[in-house]
């Protein structure tokens, strides 16, 4: 293990480490703690200039106020309407492309694979004008469906990379044995490969959920009104309205951050497995 | 009788060809979506960049005029310069992430919770990160303003200062990016061969020497991914600029991705062609990096097979 484990060090080093850990964490999360504290600060505190002291009272009412005085509930609902279909659509498409590229050997295999990989890296702006136009012409501009369609297509690139590598690492004998038995190819996919892909599917669903929930650029390009905007774009426009109402902005931020945060804590193992793909050989 | 025979012929044709055809059937839906939303738009953007177009009316052929205009556009130069600053400073996320990963790579009680809490900033949307740092930097009452006022007697409003604003936004961007690199390195450190470390320890290697000659070479896959995601993150920086400053003050914090959006879609006018030309430049910059990454990945792939 590197560095040398602290339990092998002197008791002084051990204690120092135990003390340093929480201090480092608090410093690291200082912006977050500040916002969390502000979100429960009564507005009278802000007026009195108490920005950083302990709140004079815990105003949970800030959260109620955000829900009552802004369409944030609607924004959250829109975010789910974009995110969930994207997760499902992406996984369906990438399980199939991953299977095709991971199991079969044909001449253009590697070319198609790297096309998907390269697509991941392109700057969004090179796609912006044509995608906006395309969405407009399909009658999907300013709808959650139009936004989800784009996300499905784009995320398929990243997920194909992941799925293909996962499937290529499965034991080939399984597939060969099934072929010898005369099992049809689609049955090999459905009954043999798909059940083995569960960990990959779990990892990608958490990851795609977080990416899409947190997307801001495409939300601003493809949606414009409160009835369709996801919470990131919504929060940005609320920020413009709530000038200096930092307690509301903070409460809104915390609400918007909640779903991916919960997702991360519930499915941490899968999340990290997905994110660190390729970080070890 | 003839019906059954043609049916068997069809089935046997499918049977003898299914291994050749199945991959294409499985690829088709994904490839159609990808071609429609990712591949075709790239070419279309190249085409639009040669036109004057407001997004609705008739497009007018301009030739290279959009690019010639870029050449003399001061806002474009500022954006390009800021992109370079972003790229260089964003790279700090890689060593800083490694530093935190080494700090946290212990087995004391509760360390798992510490690791996930350190990772926290990456899970949060950049919009929220931007709002947090705007509050941190806010003039008159922001924590940083108070701190500088306390230390120097004069508070610094980072986001209102044309010389500092880009650095302020990059600092906000580094926060989640460091967390991302940290998690990559934590996973990498977990997989470093213990026997090699022990052998090196017996040879008297420790501290920085150990890190440089024994650990880092084994962390190369993690470093590669960390550099890739950091370069992409730096060139994609749009959310933070948009949330924190809208490119201001006086356009001094614009980056190419934001300037492109501003030209193509903002209230100042819909200059799709000019915006597309900016996007093409950004794409070409990214292409330099993409080709490098892909080249390395293809080489590794060949090495494996």
Image: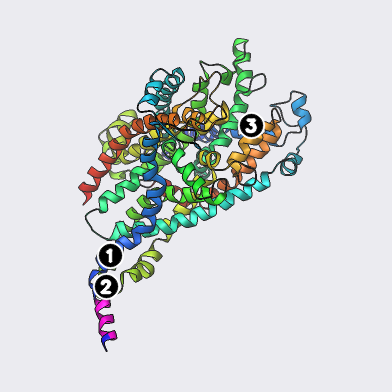
Q: Can you tell which mark lies on residue A182?
A: none
Residue B191, image x, y percentages: 34, 45
> Is residue A112 left or right of B36 when viewed as pictured?
left
Above-or-below relation of B109 to A85: above
Q: Name the residue under label 3.
A: A34
Residue matched to label 1: B21
Q: Mark 2 points at which residue?
A: B14
Residue B115 screen position, x and y as percent: 49, 41
Q: Do labels 2 and 3 share a chain?
A: no
Cβ–Cβ below 8 Å for labels 2 and 3? no
The residue range painted magenta reads: B3-12
Instruction: Give the letter of the chain under mark 1.
Output: B
Q: Pointer 2: residues within 10 angstroms few (<14), some, or many (20+)?
A: some
| Cα distance in 3D space between marks 2 and 3 | 65 Å
Percent coordinates x, y for residue B274 in the rendering: 44, 28
Label 3: chain? A
Taking the spot 37% from the left edge, 21% from the top edge, the residue there is B68
């Amino acid at each position: 293990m590197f560095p040398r484990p602290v339990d092998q060090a002197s008791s002084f080093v051990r204690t120092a480490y135990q003390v340093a850990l929480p201090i480092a964490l608090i410093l690291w999360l200082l912006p977050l703690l500040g916002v969390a504290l502000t979100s429960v600060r009564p507005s009278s505190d802000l007026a009195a200039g108490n920005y950083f002291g302990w709140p004079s009272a815990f105003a949970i009412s800030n959260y109620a106020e955000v829900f009552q005085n802004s369409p944030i509930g609607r924004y959250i609902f829109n975010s789910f309407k974009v995110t969930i279909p994207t997760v499902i659509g992406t996984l369906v498409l990438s399980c199939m492309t991953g299977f095709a590229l991971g199991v079969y050997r044909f001449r253009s295999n590697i070319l198609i694979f790297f096309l998907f990989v390269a697509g991941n890296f392109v700057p969004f702006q090179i796609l912006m004008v044509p995608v906006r136009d395309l969405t407009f012409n399909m009658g999907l501009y300013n709808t959650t469906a139009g936004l989800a369609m784009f996300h499905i297509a784009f995320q398929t690139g990243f997920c194909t990379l992941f799925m293909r590598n996962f499937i290529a690492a499965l034991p080939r004998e399984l597939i060969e044995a099934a072929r010898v038995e005369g099992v049809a190819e689609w049955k090999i996919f459905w009954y043999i490969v798909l059940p083995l892909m569960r960990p990959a599917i779990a990892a990608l669903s958490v990851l795609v959920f977080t990416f899409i929930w947190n997307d801001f650029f495409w939300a601003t390009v493809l949606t414009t009104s409160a009835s369709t905007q996801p919470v990131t774009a919504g929060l940005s426009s609320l920020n413009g309205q709530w000038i200096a109402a930092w307690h509301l902005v903070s409460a809104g931020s915390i609400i918007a951050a909640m779903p991916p945060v919960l997702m991360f804590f519930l499915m941490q193992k899968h999340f990290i497995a997905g994110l660190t793909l390729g970080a070890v050989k | 009788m003839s019906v059954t025979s043609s049916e068997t012929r069809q089935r046997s044709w499918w049977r003898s060809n299914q291994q050749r055809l199945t991959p294409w059937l499985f690829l088709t839906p994904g490839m159609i979506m990808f071609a429609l939303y990712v591949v075709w738009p790239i070419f279309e953007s190249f085409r639009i960049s040669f036109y004057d177009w407001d997004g609705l009316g008739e497009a007018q052929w301009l030739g290279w005029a959009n690019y010639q205009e870029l050449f003399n556009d001061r806002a474009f130069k500022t954006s390009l310069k800021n992109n370079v600053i972003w790229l260089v400073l964003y790279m700090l996320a890689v060593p800083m992430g490694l530093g935190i990963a080494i700090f946290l790579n212990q087995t004391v009680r509760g360390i798992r919770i510490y690791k996930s809490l350190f990772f926290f900033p990456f899970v949060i949307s950049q919009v929220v990160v931007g709002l947090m740092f705007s509050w941190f930097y806010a003039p008159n009452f922001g924590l940083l303003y108070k701190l500088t006022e306390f230390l120097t007697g004069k508070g610094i409003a980072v986001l209102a200062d044309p010389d500092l604003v880009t650095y302020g936004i990059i600092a906000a961007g580094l926060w989640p990016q460091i967390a991302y690199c940290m998690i990559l390195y934590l996973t990498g450190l977990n997989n470093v061969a213990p026997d090699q470390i022990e052998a090196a320890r017996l040879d008297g290697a420790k501290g920085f020497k150990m890190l440089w000659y024994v650990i880092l070479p084994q962390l190369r896959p993690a470093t590669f991914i960390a550099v890739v995601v950091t370069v992409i993150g730096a060139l994609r920086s749009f959310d933070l600029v948009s949330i924190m400053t809208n490119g201001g003050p006086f356009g001094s914090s614009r980056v190419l991705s934001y300037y492109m959006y501003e030209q193509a879609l903002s209230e100042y006018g819909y200059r799709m062609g000019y915006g597309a030309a900016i996007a093409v430049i950004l794409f070409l910059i990214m292409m330099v990096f993409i080709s490098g990454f892909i080249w390395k990945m293809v080489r590794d792939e060949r090495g494996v097979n």
